[in-house]
């Protein structure tokens, strides 16, 4: 599911405007997906990061 941001008016985008993701070749797309999956996996495994408090 994809949510649209309120401040972005999609009527300003031409229907024939190419999407950046579609301009990337299939091998590069798969590499990007794999990298993002690894990053997400690391974030989930490490849990939420906590910052030092000044109190």
Image (cartoon, rainbow, N blue to C red):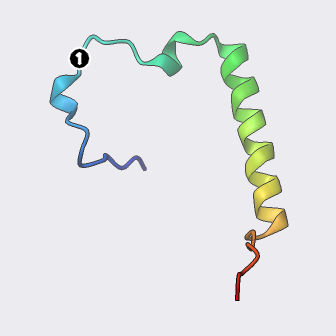
Residue 7 is drawn in which quadrant?
top left
Q: Residue furthest bottom?
A: 55
Residue depicted at x 77% and y 35%: 35
Decide if residue 19 is on the left or right side of residue 46.
left
| Residue 19 at x, y percent in the picture | 42, 18
Q: Quadrant of the C terminus?
A: bottom right
Q: Is residue 54 left or right of residue 8?
A: right
Residue 1, above or below 30: below
Q: Residue furthest left?
A: 11
Q: Which picture quadrant has residue 13? A: top left
Crowding near the residue tagged with mark 1, few <14, some 14–19, many ≥20 C-alpha atoms within 10 Å: few
Describe the element under mark 1 as helix, strand or loop.
Answer: loop
The image position of residue 37, as x and y in percent, is 74, 44
What is the count of numbered marks?
1
Q: Nearer the viewer, residue 11 or 25?
A: 11
Picture coordinates of residue 38, whole percent (x, y): 81, 44
Q: Which residue is mark 1?
A: 15
Looking at the image, which residue is at 19% across and 36% down? Answer: 9
Q: Residue at x 75, y 68 (%)?
A: 49
In the image, residue 49 above or below residue 6: below
Depth order, front residue of 32/51: 51
The residue depicted at 66 percent of the width and 22 percent of the height is: 29
Q: Quadrant of residue 44?
A: bottom right
Direction from residue 53 to residue 24 in the image, left or right: left
């Amino acid at each position: 599911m994809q949510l649209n941001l309120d401040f972005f008016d999609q009527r300003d985008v031409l229907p024939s405007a190419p999407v950046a993701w579609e301009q990337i070749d299939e091998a590069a797309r798969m590499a990007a997906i794999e990298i993002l999956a690894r990053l997400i996996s690391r974030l989930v495994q490490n849990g939420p990061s906590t910052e030092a408090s000044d109190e």
